[in-house]
Amino acid sequence: CLQWLVEHGADTTTPASNGYTPEQLVWVNNRNHAVEQEWLEAAMKGELTEKKSVLAQEYKLKRWRPEGLDPQAESWLDKNKDRQLWYRYKTGDFQMPYDLPTLQESVAKMDLPRSTIPWPPSKGKPPLPVALLFPGQGSQYVGMLKDCMNLPAVQKMLVTAEKILGWSVKDLMLNGPKEKLNETRYCQPAMFIACMAALELMKETKRELVDRAQAVAGLSLGEYAAVCAAGVLEFEDCLNLVNLRAE
């Protein structure tokens, strides 16, 4: 094997790129049956960098190969050099005797239907519980209803609110003016409705969070929204209380 490497121009006087010298590979490495192949691969790739003893390699080859195997090894190397270079490093002129389809081509040819078997439940940690916290007066801003005003439940709330309050919450929240929206008389009913509208939006977009809610709370005015969200009081009753509070 060593002679074959020399004849084919491989550098046989330096160790592998892992830093071990040939002597170390012979006397220390407990995988001597694999050392020769590893060193051969490194030599063929040109990764041997430091000058070391050829005698150690000769000793290793003689020690771990039966006598009379050299001609067979040389013949195999001559026949399979290109194939080994292609198989291990994807280089060289070797070509497979048949076409190998890509992964995508193989999957397309199978034409298998999608599995209808459901995934088993996750064995990981269960999701954390959720608490809903509603803000109070001071969080208001003009336009705060625009992301959810088209939801049927929100439209129904706005119609009910206008009947109870006697003025259009929708117009004030969407168009202002800001000074009027900041007045307690108008701000608190608007904020209560905004909280309930946000809850309806969560039911549409993040239903799993609403279903996992185990607690509701609110800051000052937000306590009314929490009571309503918990189902303790109906929307109309809460809005009447908020309206009295605002006055």
Image (cartoon, rainbow, N blue to C red):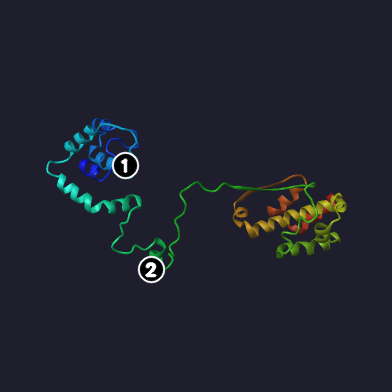
* In front: label 2 or label 1: 1
Say if 112 sits above or below 198 in the image: below
Q: CA distance from mark 2 to mark 1?
A: 39 Å
User: Which amino acid type corresponds to the residue marked 1 in the rendered image?
Assistant: Ala
Q: Which residue is mark 2?
A: 109
The x, y position of residue 20, in whole percent, is 31, 33
The part of the image, by quadrant, that contains residue 11 is top left
**Element assignment for label 2:** helix
**Element assignment for label 1:** helix
- Given residues 81 and 31, the one toward you in this image is 81
Q: Quadrant of the N terminus?
A: top left
The part of the image, by quadrant, that contains residue 28 is top left
The reply to whether the C-beta atoms of the residues labelled 2 and 1 are less than 8 Å apart is no
The x, y position of residue 27, in whole percent, is 24, 30
Q: Which residue is mark 1?
A: 42
- Given residues 193 and 30, the one toward you in this image is 30
How many residues crowd mark 1 within 10 Å: few (<14), some (14–19), many (20+)? many
Residue for point 30% across, 64% down: 98
Residue for point 80% across, 46% down: 138
The x, y position of residue 50, in whole percent, is 33, 33
Image mark for residue 51: none
- Left or right placement of residue 119 versus residue 181 in this view: left
User: Which amino acid type corresponds to the residue marked 2 in the rendered image?
Assistant: Lys
- Given residues 117 and 188, the one toward you in this image is 117
- Left or right placement of residue 123 versus residue 203 in this view: left
Q: Earlier in the sequence, mark 2 or mark 1?
A: 1
The x, y position of residue 177, in whole percent, is 86, 55
How many residues crowd mark 2 within 10 Å: few (<14), some (14–19), many (20+)? few
- Left or right placement of residue 84 versus residue 104 in this view: left
Q: How many marks?
A: 2
Say if 53 sits above or below 120 in the image: above
The part of the image, by quadrant, that contains residue 159 is bottom right
